[in-house]
Amino acid sequence: MDNDASSYTPPPGEAVTVEALRRGDENVFSELVTEHSPAMLRVARMHVSSQAVADEVVQEAWLGVISGIDRFEGRASLKTWIFRIVANIAKTRGERERRSVPFSSVGGREGNAEAAVDGDRFLDAGRWAGHWTSAPSRWSELPEEQLVGGETVGVVEAAIAALPEVQRTVITLRDVEGWSSEDVRNALDLTETNQRVILHRARSKVRRALEGYLDGEQR
Amino acid sequence: MSENELSCREFVEIVTEYLEGGLTPAERVRFEEHLDGCDGCVNYLDQIRTSISLTGRVTTDDLTDETKVELLAAFRDWKRD
């Protein structure tokens, strides 16, 4: 984050956005709020216990953005700066709520119990040990409307809702919001490896839920 | 299966690293060689990709309209100061 400050180049158009905010351009502010608030809520939700408090945290963060924009130095992107503000406020609120964030469990505790695919899907012995006992099916052969239908997306949504908080946040930022891994690492203060391990677990579980649903229907 | 060949069980655990560009060139070769000879894993990789793209269709929570209106009012006030 700060160590690459010297080589940092702001994203194109960012200076224009910052200038517009300083001038008090309501449309630009409103667009930013629309663009970033869903992800900010997700980040806030990692630290505080309810959606209502997360809402307050995000609101407070935006007020911090308004009052701080004149002091924004552009040493990191505006997005990084905004997400640092929301993370700091959320952490403080979370500590006040005495609800600790289980970040330390990120790569540990859950351990190897979390295989991407159930162990009984693979052969244990013989020449083909480690190979599929029942191979995954070809989803591309499913009817398009079944694959992209609202019900299928609902299965994904439910699977994400059932994930541990950190996994839910990472997969939401990466695959729902479309963030880069670098942005996620910066906003959540994760190492590259941790980010990848968490994402892997989250994606594996979503696939598994989809398999249960899509293949169940087929049979 | 020779010893340095990847098993399907191992394959599914490094799929994310593959997609994230986190494998070394040698690991990448092993991964792709396995893919060449294994329809099950071709399907698995395809399922993961489909799963990622379906995740992109999920909508997220947003601030209430009320909060947005309040924020815009706060922005307007700040501009006036």
Image (spheres, coloured by chain):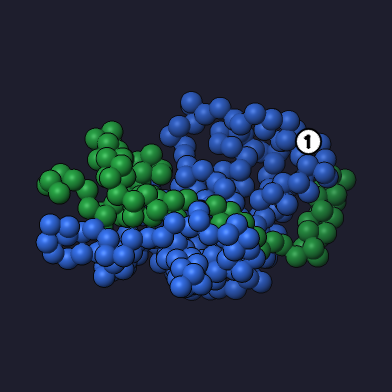
Chain colours: A blue, B green
Check disc 1: other Cα within 10 Å, few if <14, some if 14-19, many if 20+: some
Q: Which residue occupies 83% across, 59% down?
A: B69
Q: Is residue A10 left or right of residue A215?
A: right
Q: Chain of mark 1?
A: A
Q: Residue at x 58, y 54 (%)?
A: B56
Q: Is residue A113 left or right of residue A35?
A: left
Is residue B53 visible from the viewing direction of this image?
Answer: yes
Q: What residue occupies the far right of the structure in this picture?
A: B80
A183 sits left or right of B33 in the view: right
Q: Quadrant of residue A20?
A: top right
Question: In the depicted view, which residue is nearer to us: A93 or A47?
Answer: A47
User: Residue at left 31%, top 45%?
Assistant: B35
The residue that label 1 is drawn on is A20
B63 in relation to B24, above or below:
below
Query: Please, what is the three-letter code of the amino acid marked with disc 1?
Result: Ala
As drawn, B66 above or below A140: below
Q: Residue A208: where, in percent of width, then height?
A: 42, 66
In percent of width and height, residue A195 lies at 41, 51
- Is A159 above or below relative to B70? below
x, y percent for residue B13: 31, 55
In the rendered image, residue A183, in percent from the top left (x then y), is placed at: 51, 44
Q: Nearer the viewer, residue A39 or A123?
A: A123
* Residue at x 60% of width, y 73% of height: A50
Front-most of B17 and A58? B17
Count of labels in the image: 1
Which SS class for mark 1?
helix
Q: Is residue A87 visible?
A: no
